[in-house]
Image: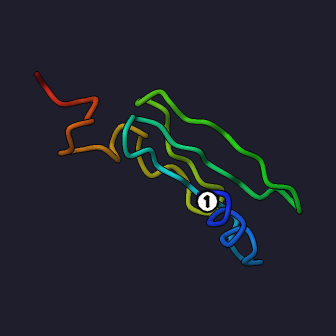
Amino acid sequence: MLEAKLRYYQGHEHNRCVLFVGHDRVGADQYDRQGGIWRRQRLADPQTPLAFADIGTIGRLGDLYKLTPLDPFAEA
């Protein structure tokens, strides 16, 4: 299923990044288009910056989980 979504998003000529965020664990797969080649980067560390070529850094991977049961920065 994710493969079909990935192909769909990669098929749009102006799309340069795809980010699939984990729903059962802290993690994400980031796909960036560099020229005509897509490169995957697997993100797992909550401190990893979320950086996109055309936008810049928008936060950290762990920030995507704020106020969820997976929030890695929540105080116990």
Farthest-out residue, top: 76
Counting the numbered discs, the total is 1
Examine the rendered structure and indicate whether residue 21 appears above or below residue 3.
above
Furthest residue toward right = 36
The chosen color scheme is: rainbow
Q: Which quadrant of the figure has residue 12?
A: bottom right
Q: Residue 52 location, x and y as percent?
A: 60, 54
**Residue farthest left in this picture:** 76
Question: Which residue is the site of mark 1?
Answer: 18
- Picture coordinates of residue 15, whole percent (x, y): 68, 71
* Left or right of 48 in this view: 17: right
| Quadrant placement of the C terminus | top left
What residue lies at 86% left-to-right and 56% top-to-bottom?
Answer: 37
- Position in image of residue 50 (x %, y %): 50, 45
The answer to whether residue 25 is above or below residue 23 is: above
The residue type indicated by label 1 comes to Val
Residue 36: image quadrant is: bottom right
Query: Residue 55 versus residue 8: which sits nearer the camera?
Result: 8
Residue visible at 41% across and 31% down in the picture: 46
Tell me which residue sits at (21%, 44%) in the image: 68
Instruction: Please tell me which residue is depicted at 75% across the width and 74% down the height of the picture.
Output: 11
Neighbour tally class for label 1: few under 14, some 14-19, many 20 plus, Cα within 10 Å: some
Q: Position of residue 2 (x, y in %)?
A: 60, 57
Give the left or right position of residue 72, taking residue 2 as reference.
left
Secondary structure category for the residue under label 1 = strand
In the picture provided, is 16 more to the left or to the right than 43?
right
**Quadrant of res 26:** top left
- Above/below status of 6 relative to 57: below
In the image, residue 46 above or below residue 23: above
Rendered-image quadrant of the N terminus: bottom right
